[in-house]
Amino acid sequence: MVSRKPFDRIDSCRLEKVTKKYGDRFAVKNLNLEIQGGELLILIGRSGSGKTTALRMINRLIEPDSGSISVNGIDVREFDPILLRRNIGYVIQNIGLLPHLRVSENIGLILKLESWKEEKIRERVKYLLNLVSLPPQIFMERYPHELSGGQQQRVGLARAMAMDPPLFLMDEPFGALDPLLRSQLQDEFCKIKKELGRTIVFVTHDINEAFRLGDRIAVMNNAELVQVGTPEELIFSPANDLVAEIVDSKRKYRHIDALKVRDIMQPLEKRYILYPGMSAASALDYMVKVGLEVALVFWNPENTGRVYLNDVLNAVSSGKSLEEAAKPLPLFSPEISLLEALARLKAEGESMGLVLEADKPAGILFSDRVLENLI
Ligand code: ADP
Ligand code: MG
C-alpha cells in the first residue's frame, strides 16, 4: 500500500475492462477508457447508463468486480482509499455541505484534517471563495442554509478544490440549478478550468453542457461505452444512431454543409456600432455609459474594425483617433457557406467576423459559438 500523497499531476487515468454488476445486471460493462492529463472528459448518457458508477470507481467509492483502474500507470488499489480521495476533488449535485458548519469551516475541513495552521487555512479559504466569485467578507461566516442553491454549489466546488487536487470527478454538478444560473456557473467554471489546468471527468446528461465544457465526450448506453471523441468527431462521424440522436437533437448538423453564415450569425444590435466622426473621447464616454466592452467601428465596407474598451482608453490618452485604434475585422456576406467562413476565420487567426448585408453591418459571426448556436 502506498501511503504518501498518491499523485501531484495526472499524465493519464486509464480504465481497462472495468465491469461492475448489481445482481445479474451490469451497471458498467467491460469499460475501456483513457482520460488524458489536462483534459475535461465528459461522460454523457441516459439515466441509468452507468455514468455515476464509472465515476465512483475511479476514487474507489465503488470497487469494480473486474478490470483495473490506474492513474499514471499505478493501480488505484495500491493507494490508501482515504488518501486517494483527498487527492481527487469530488463534486456532486446535492453538494452535501455540513449544515452546522460555516462556509469557511466546510471548505477548510480537509485542510484541518491535514493539520494545516489556522492562518493558512483562512488564507486558502479566501482565495478559493474569490475563485468561485463569492466575496469572502460576505460569505465566510454564513451557514449553508443562508445560501442560494447556486451559492451552495460554488462552495461545494471551492471545497473540492481545497487540497488543490490534480484530478476532479464531477457528477452533474450543475444539474439541479435553473438554466440561467447554470449557464453563468458554466461560464465561470470554464474560466476556473483554464486557470487551474486540471484534469476533469464530468458527468452530465445535457448535450449543450457537454459541448460547452468538454474537450472530449464519452457516450455511454446500457452500461457500455458507445463512442468517445471530440464534439466534432461525434457530430460528423457518430458511431451509431444513438450517438447521432444525442449530438444532433435538432438535426441541423446533418445539413452543416448547406448552412450559410446567415443561419448562424448573431444579429448585431445598433448600440454596438460606432459611426464615423466620433472622437475617441466620445466613444469612450458612450461605451462606458452603455456598458460595452467591445464595439464595432463602421465607416463603410472598406473601413471597419473592432475596438475593445482598453484600445479606446489608450487612444484617448495617446491622442489617437478612433479609426487608428480599431483593428480590421474579416467581412462576410450572409450568403456564403458557413464552413468557408469558419475556414477563413481560422486562417486569419480571428474569433469573430462582421457580416455585411447591402453594405450595412447586419450581424457577427463568432467562431467559438458556432457549435453552441447549432444546438
Ligand atoms: P447513471 O449515473 O448513468 O444514471 P448509474 O451508474 O447510477 O447510472 O447506474 C447504472 C445502473 O446500475 C442503473 O441501472 C442503476 O439502477 C444500477 N445501480 C446503481 N447503483 C446501484 C446499487 N447500489 N444497487 C443496485 N443497482 C444499482
Ligand atoms: Mg448518475
Image (cartoon, rainbow, N blue to C red):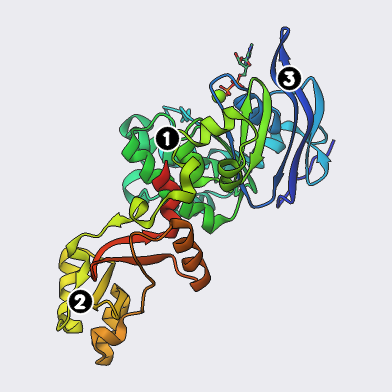
Q: Amino acid at mark 1?
A: Lys
Q: Is residue 133 left or right of residue 72?
A: left
Q: Is residue 300 left or right of residue 351?
A: left
User: Of circles 1 and 3, which is in front?
Assistant: 1
> Can see residue 204?
no
Q: Quadrant of the C terminus?
A: top left
Task: Name the spot of residue 35 as percent of width and height, x first.
Answer: 69, 43
Q: Amino acid at mark 2?
A: Leu
Mark 1 CB near ligand 1 (8 Å cut):
no
Pointer 1 residue: 250
**Upstream in the sequence, badge 1 or badge 3?**
3
Task: Name the spot of residue 13 as percent of width and height, x first.
Answer: 73, 42
User: Of circles 1 and 2, which is in front?
Assistant: 1
Quick one: 102 or 238, which is closer to the camera? 238
The answer for how far apart the CA atoms under marks 1 and 2 are is: 42 Å
The image quadrant that residue 338 belongs to is bottom left
The answer for how far apart the CA atoms under marks 1 and 3 are is: 34 Å
Task: Name the spot of residue 139 as percent of width and height, x first.
Answer: 35, 44
The image quadrant that residue 65 belongs to is top right
Mark 3 CB near ligand 1 (8 Å cut):
yes
Q: Which mark, by number, is residue 63?
A: none
**Upstream in the sequence, badge 1 or badge 2?**
1
